[in-house]
Image (cartoon, rainbow, N blue to C red):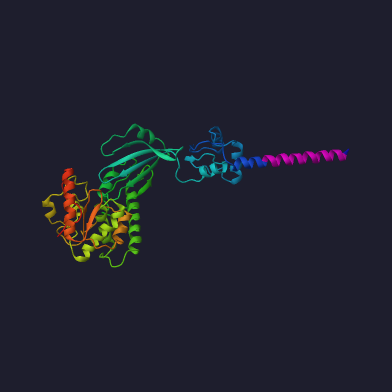
Amino acid sequence: MWKAVASNALTFFIVFLVIASGLLAWGRKEYSGPGPLADAMCFRVERGATLSSVSRMLESSGVISDARIFRIGADYSGQGSGLKFGSYLLPAQTSMVGVLDIITAGGQSTCGSEVNFRIGIASSDVILRELDAATNRYVEVASFDPAVDALPQPYLDAVEDLDLRYRVTLAEGVTSWQVVEMLRRAEFMEGTVDEVPAEGSLAPDSYDVTRGGDRAALLAVMQERQAKTLAALWADRAPDLPYASPEEALVMASIVEKETGIAEERRQVASVFVNRLRKGMKLQTDPTVIYGVTNGEGILGRGLRQSELRRETPYNTYVIAGLPPGPIANPGRLSIEAALNPDDTPFIFFVADGTGGHAFAVTLEEHNANVAAWRKIEAQRGQEGTTGVQGN
């Protein structure tokens, strides 16, 4: 009898082990294998949410197959108490372990909406975008000019979301005055700016900010980034450049930045000015003259007058020799690279060619022909003014 009891007990124990092993294997497969989510989605973890409530939401949303397995796996891995508030992009068929990694990783949210405050040369705007989880691309919801437009309702609704992300983006070639003036219109930032940073000292780039962030602190970050960029590129500069200091290279970079918006041309444009400096020729470039007229406070909005081209100012490179006393804008990294590593060319002239680029020349005769071609294009377009480097 006892043998039968022992045999039955052993049988039950073996069956139990088999069932337990099967359940464990099934649980591991459910936890580590592809999830049931058919399409990518944005999932929000509320502030103060518990693992239990989040697991139930994930199950009801079709992200995971079993909330209990998710909780057991989270507790076993030690991530159960590491939930991070925010909105997260969950790709289709993400496993439970993948979901857990995403919502406990911390850092910026990977889904939801963002505000991009874009500071441009001619105008600025605020873009409200929302991530389309299906395509993993942002879709514009609203846009407005903070200088002239009232805040649109979609924007007012969006700023109620504490998880809304903010970004400030500087275009290459903006002046420091323009940056400060527009930051003062950024309603989501705080703090005063007592002085306009030195021209050229701000790095055109995109900056993540928080609502209520300090304007002066952001400007300091921009200055630090530009200083690091200039120092690194100065250390890797070409030999025998006609600059006495990194600051002079920054002046040249700002001129290159304002002369061409075509990345492939920057080193050629820089070569023209470097060749002129080496030959003792005046730079004769319109953007410096314009800066002497506007002081960087907005755009001129018209062609230069002959009286302005003849007037002696520290920035009139038709009159003064060498570089102007300071930068005329905030140049981007590519223009600084061009100024410090220009192409090796014989060019000493260039003028617009009507395509957005420039025609380069070695001799005054070649240049005059290029200028004549440009004047015909100007006449056809009804434009006036000069551009590029003129002949002596």
Taking the magenta stretch, the answer to whether it contains residue 14 is: yes
Which residue is more in the foreground, 88 or 381? Answer: 381
Dominant secondary structure (helix, strand or loop) of the stretch shown in magenta: helix
In the image, is 45 to the left or to the right of 242?
right
| Residue ranking furthest to the bottom | 240
Q: Is residue 201 magenta?
A: no
Q: x and y percent of residue 92 in the render? A: 52, 39
**Horizontal and vertical percent position of residue 61:** 53, 33
- Observer-nearest of 156 and 290: 290
- What's the magenta region? 2-23
Say which residue appears at 26% left-offset and 42% top-offset. 123
- Left/right placement of residue 244 relative to residue 27 reads left
Residue 290 place in picture, x, y as percent: 18, 51
How many tags in the picture?
0
Q: Residue furthest right?
A: 1
Tell me which residue sits at (30%, 57%) in the image: 336
Q: Quadrant of the C terminus?
A: bottom left
Q: Position of residue 110 (x, y in %)?
A: 45, 42
* Quarter of the N terminus within the rendering: top right
* Rendering quarter of residue 63: top right
Q: Is residue 287 left or right of residue 169?
A: left
The reply to whether residue 45 is in sight is no
Q: Looking at the rendering, which quadrant does residue 200 occupy?
A: bottom left
Residue 126 visible in the snapshot: yes
> Which is more toward the observer, 214 or 75?
75
